[in-house]
Amino acid sequence: MPDLTTTALVIALVALTFGGFSKGVLGVGLPMVAIPILSTFLPIRDVVAIMYFPILATNIWQAFNGGYLMATLRRFWPMLLVMMATIALGTLSLRSLDTNLISILLGLAVALFALSSLINPQFRIAPRHERPASLLAGGIGGYFGGLALIGGPPVIMLMVALHLKKEEFIGAMGMFYLVMLIPTGFILAGLGVLETRHVMPGLATIAPVMAGLAAGQWLRGRIDQDRFRKLLLGSMVLIGLNLIRRGLF
């Protein structure tokens, strides 16, 4: 991997901390904030491999910290099976697609997620439609999770449409990411995307991410979360559009 300049290292540190902060406040956002920024000065495959470690660490914490693990498993186990089945397809695409196309797909995922969340349509999925909707969200989420560790957007929109309570949503998303990340790690290693040279930088990223996570959790109940969420999503739209621009031009 190329050596980073001091400026790039500072930017990376800020991106990791802010990504952890987003994760702490909203329960999501670490890969969607950090990966696009880091990919501006590192190859996307290296970024995905390095970010695997802090993403795994934060979701282990999130999945077991809220007390909703078993309830989420009972309700969404079919969705999790579909998600695990499509992870391999996404990871294979990571190896075979060119960098520009990956950048475009990543930008689209980030921008569409942010725009959809800003619009936040007020609708509720009827109980009879929950199973097929969850299978679709799991399939798409698994693919993008294997492609770039960003499998959250379709699952997040499903959770919003089901009107889960805030803490239940946060715990459920931690569990979804954890189920997605464990097989993804083996697949990335088997395909040669995740290598031993990624272990030390990956472990080094955990500290700033966890610091941001702790700050975000502390602030979660003490600030206007909706206002912060809108500011964050607005910045993510710009990040996504910038990735699309890089891929096209």
Image (cartoon, rainbow, N blue to C red):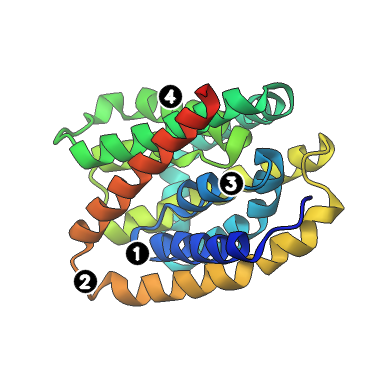
Residue 117 or residue 185, whichever sits in front: 117
Q: Amino acid at mark 2?
A: Ile
- Left or right: 97 in relation to 210: right
Classify 53 as above or below 133: below
Q: Quadrant of residue 187?
A: top right
Number of the front mark, 2 or 4:
2
Identify the element where label 3 is drawn.
Answer: helix
Disc nearer the start of the sequence (2/4): 4
Residue 96 versus residue 235 in the image, above or below = above
Dot 1: within a 10 Å radius of its alpha carbon, few (fewer than 14), some, or many (20 or more) residues? Answer: many
> For numbered disc 2, what is the local secondary structure?
loop
Whole-number angstrom distance, CA of label 2 to CA of label 1: 10 Å
Closer to the chain start, of discs 3 and 1, is 1
Q: Which residue is mark 3?
A: 179
Q: Circle 4 sits on which residue?
A: 136
Sequence-wise, which precedes: disc 4 or disc 3?
4
